[in-house]
Image: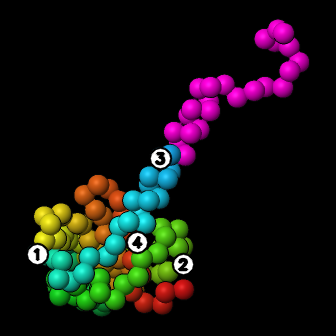
């Protein structure tokens, strides 16, 4: 049989291994996202508010405190990134950000947007997308 013959193309070992490695990576990423959970308030050792939203014109954004963050986390539900990005509205340019440190020492970045959206970014880069109101 010739290499340039009329046989249909067959996957090479290299392409099969690449596909298997890619699928394994997807499984690991999906499992990490599934295992990420919203920390309970008693698991939080400390909290810091690092940036507050700036008002525009007559609109003045509410101030966010660490207590507000704890309440948000207690009431929020995790949703997929796609749902978070496309199914909810928020106030533009009004993000509040900061960090929480868990009792385990893990540092987690948080973001809260007026309108009930939030995000946690774990040390390993995993993001947990949160909605506090109107979970569909």
Tell me what residue is drawn at x 34 percent, y 89 percent. Answer: 75
SS of the residue under disc 4: strand
SS of the residue under disc 1: strand
Alpha carbons under labels 1 and 4: distance apart: 21 Å
Give the mark, 2 or 3, whose residue is nearer the N terminus: 3
Give the mark, 3 or 4, whose residue is nearer the N terminus: 3
Residue indicated by mark 2: 87
Alpha carbons under labels 1 and 2: distance apart: 32 Å
Write the start and end of the magenta stretch as one range: 1-23
Task: Tell whether label 1 touches label 3 (CB within 8 Å).
Answer: no
Give the total number of marks visible in the rendering: 4
Question: Where does residue 120 sit, x and y in percent of width and height?
Answer: 31, 69
Residue 101 part of the magenta segment: no
Task: Tell whether label 4 touches label 1 (CB within 8 Å).
Answer: no
Give the mark, 1 or 4, whose residue is nearer the N terminus: 1
Viewer-nearest residue: 3 or 117: 3
Give the mark, 1 or 2, whose residue is nearer the N terminus: 1
Residue indicated by mark 3: 25
Image quarter of the C terminus? bottom right
SS of the residue under disc 3: helix
Q: Nearer the viewer, mark 1 or mark 2?
A: 1
Residue 11 part of the magenta segment: yes
Q: Which of marks 4 and 2 is in front?
A: 4
Tell me what residue is drawn at x 47 percent, y 67 percent. Answer: 81
Viewer-nearest residue: 53 or 9: 9
Q: Where on the picture, by quarter, is residue 95?
A: bottom left
Q: Residues within 10 Å of mark 1 (few under 14, many from 20)?
A: few
Give the left or right position of residue 109, taking residue 136 as reference: left
Q: Which label number is shown at residue 129?
A: 4
Up/down of 6 relative to 64, above or below: above
Q: Nearer the viewer, mark 3 or mark 1?
A: 3
Q: Which label number is shown at residue 46?
A: 1
């Amino acid at each position: 049989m010739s290499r340039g013959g009329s046989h249909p193309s067959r996957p090479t070992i290299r392409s099969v291994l690449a596909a298997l490695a890619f699928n394994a990576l997807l499984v690991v990423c999906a499992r990490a996202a599934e295992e990420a959970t919203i920390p309970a308030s008693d698991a939080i050792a400390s909290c810091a508010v690092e940036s507050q939203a700036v008002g525009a014109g007559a609109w003045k954004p509410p101030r966010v405190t660490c207590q507000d963050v704890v309440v948000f986390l207690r009431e929020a539900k995790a949703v997929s990134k796609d749902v978070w990005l496309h199914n909810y509205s928020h106030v533009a340019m009004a993000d509040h950000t900061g960090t929480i440190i868990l009792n385990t020492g893990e540092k987690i970045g948080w973001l809260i947007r007026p309108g009930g959206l939030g995000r946690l970014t774990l040390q390993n880069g995993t993001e947990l997308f949160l909605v506090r109101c109107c979970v569909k």
